[in-house]
Every structure is written in structure tokens, then in C-alpha cells.
Image (cartoon, helix red, strand yellow):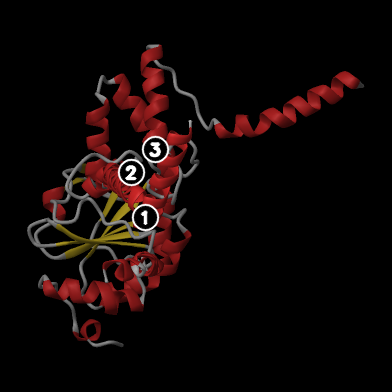
Amino acid sequence: MNRSMLTFVLLWLVSPLALAVIETYEFSSSDLEARYQQMSAELRCPKCQNQNIADSNAPIAQDLRKLLHQQLEAGASNDEIKQFMVSRYGEFVLYRPRFSGATAVLWLAPALLFICAALVVFVSLRRRGRSLPDSALSEADKKRLQGLVGNTEKGS
Amino acid sequence: MGSRLKLFLPLALFIVLALFLFRGLSLDPKAMPSALVDHPLPEFTLPGLGEKRQLSRDDVTGQVAFFNVWATWCISCRVEHPYLQQLADWGVAIYGINYKDEDAAALKWLAELGDPYRANIADREGTLGLDLGVYGAPETYLVDRDGIVRYRHVGVVDERVWTTILRPRYLALGGAVAEGGVQAP
């Protein structure tokens, strides 16, 4: 009884995973398989709004996985495969867009924003550091302080 | 004065952000420009549907024409079919790309529903579809005299699509159409 319950629960847990793997491919080396996993996670399914081809069960994603497998086995480099996909489906298919005029803002904005923020922090800290001694005590207070310090020094 | 202006900085930032977000509201995330626009129609050698002869790029280019990607398993294709027939009756040049389909089913479809196509390319494995960047039927490509793809429409071609999107482009390229197709019916 217990064991069958356990089996049931395990099956229930496993089934979504089983569904996620839509088809399996044989690879001639584990290196190719690793590249297949990486590339299929980085290529975007053209039909779906926000899914990579590894996760999608759209017919087009299936075709692209098949193609990816074929090209990997044929010895194509990652860049060649990406170029093949982009020339047909546009930059849209790349989840990691290549650096170009159109994507420069995308790639450079984080660094630029970080530099801007660092500058603002730097400048405001410096300004505060400089202005503190001036504003903390007025001229009259300073004289009074000097007088007090002078008195204690004499007294000791 | 400088510090007073600084008070408006958050407002300025908010306005810039709001403008971007507002623009984003009217963008269509599904709009995906074809990578093939302004590139030649890919080379292919595929059988004609229901024919013995092989068709290649040169057989189907030379005039301004539409290339309609369709299949019998595609429900939207059935929806747009009568309108394609209407366009063909007006003399609009339409070629069919029968995409990942079975010949028998496709021929039955054409016999029953009518055949608006000048010729049909039987792309059984979807290889031409892949080179075209097809990601779902129906898709309709506008190709000019020199065999250069000028526009790609994804989805059903109906009267609205024809009059607002496809007809102006087709006519601008010098596409042939009878009287009924020029004036809005």
C-alpha cells in the first residue's frame, strides 16, 4: 500500500519532466550534446512569444531542434548555426543578441548607467565632505570653541 | 536656481519613462519583420503538387506575385481560401507553397474548394519553408519581378489585409490586377 502510494507520487512528480522532453537525439559525443543543450536554450522559438526551442513543443521549435542536431553532427560551429538561423528568422531568434549597431544600446547601457551612478555618488560624497566643516560651525561658534579649548588647555 | 531645477529631475525622469511605456503599449510584440525582406526568394527544386515536373525558383519568378504558404492541417488557411480565390479571379498572381502536407489531401482540398494558385510547390519536408523563415501557416510573401521578397504577411489574408496592406504594395511594384481588385469591393 505504502509502496504503491510512493510510486504514484513519484510518477506524478516525474510526469511533467517526461512531457518536457519531446524527442531525444543520439549524439556522437557528449561535447555535442552539451552544445545542443546550450544552443537549444539560447535559441528562441519564432512562433512563441517567450520560449526557447528547448522548452517549446510548437512544430517549428521541433523542426529547429532537428536542424540544430543535424548541423551539430555535421560539424557546424555555434556561430555558423546562429548565422543560419538569423538569416532566416532574424535577430529575434537569439536570446543573447550579438553586438551590433542596433544592439549597442542594449549591451552598453548597464555599464553606462553604472558609471553615471558612480559619478553621482562620488561627486555628492565629495561635496558633502567639503561643505561639512563650513556649515557645522559658524564663525561665532568657532571663536567660542577656540575660547573654550584655550581655557581648558590653560586650566590643565 | 540650479538646485531648484534639480527638484524637477524626478518629474523629468518620470515623463521620459512614461513616454517609453506609452510607446510600448502600441507596439505589437508579435510583429516580426521577415529576415528575407529585400533578399531574393531562396533557391529550391521541389516537385509541383500533383505534377511530375520539378519546379525551381526561375519557374515561378519573373512577375510580381504572391507566394502563399498553406496546408490542409491549417485551419486559418481554410478561412482565407475563398478570399484568395477572389483575388485570383481578379487576376492577382498567387503561387502556393503546400507546406508539410500530404499530396492527396492537398489535391482533394483544391478540387473541393477551388484552386486559386498558378502553380503549387509541394514542400513536403518544409525545407523551402525553413529557408523562407516560415514559422506558421498561413503566411503570404510578396515577390517582385526580379524575384526579391518585398513583404511578408503572417496570418489570414482577408479584405482588410488586402486593401490596407497588400494591395498598395502589390500595385506599387506594378502587379497586375483587374478592375474589381483595384477598387474596394
Rounded to the nearest angstrom, the CA distance separating label 2 from label 3 is 14 Å
- For label 2, the SS is helix
Q: Are marks 2 and 3 on the same chain?
A: yes
Q: Where's the C terminus of chain B, which quadrant? A: bottom left
Q: Is residue A97 left or right of residue B155?
A: left
What's the chain of the residue with tag 1?
A
**Residue most extreme to the right:** A1
Q: Is residue B46 left or right of residue B80?
A: left
Q: Residue at x 12, y 56 (%)?
A: B148
Q: Nearer the viewer, residue A14 or A71?
A: A14
| Badge 1 or badge 2: first in the primary sequence | 2
Residue assigned mark 2: A93
- For label 3, the SS is helix
Q: What is the number of the mark on residue A135?
A: 1
Q: Is residue A69 above or below residue A131?
A: above
Q: Is residue A43 above or below residue A26?
A: below
Q: Nearer the viewer, residue B129 or A120?
A: A120
| Badge 2 or badge 3: first in the primary sequence | 3
- Classed neighbour count for the residue bearing mark 1: other residues with Cα under 10 Å, few (<14), some (14–19), many (≥20): few
Residue assigned mark 3: A63
Q: Is residue A103 above or below residue B37?
A: above
Q: Where's the N terminus of chain B, which quadrant? A: bottom left
User: Which quadrant of the structure image shows residue B92?
Assistant: bottom left
Name the mark nearer the viewer: 3 or 1: 1
Name the mark nearer the viewer: 1 or 2: 1
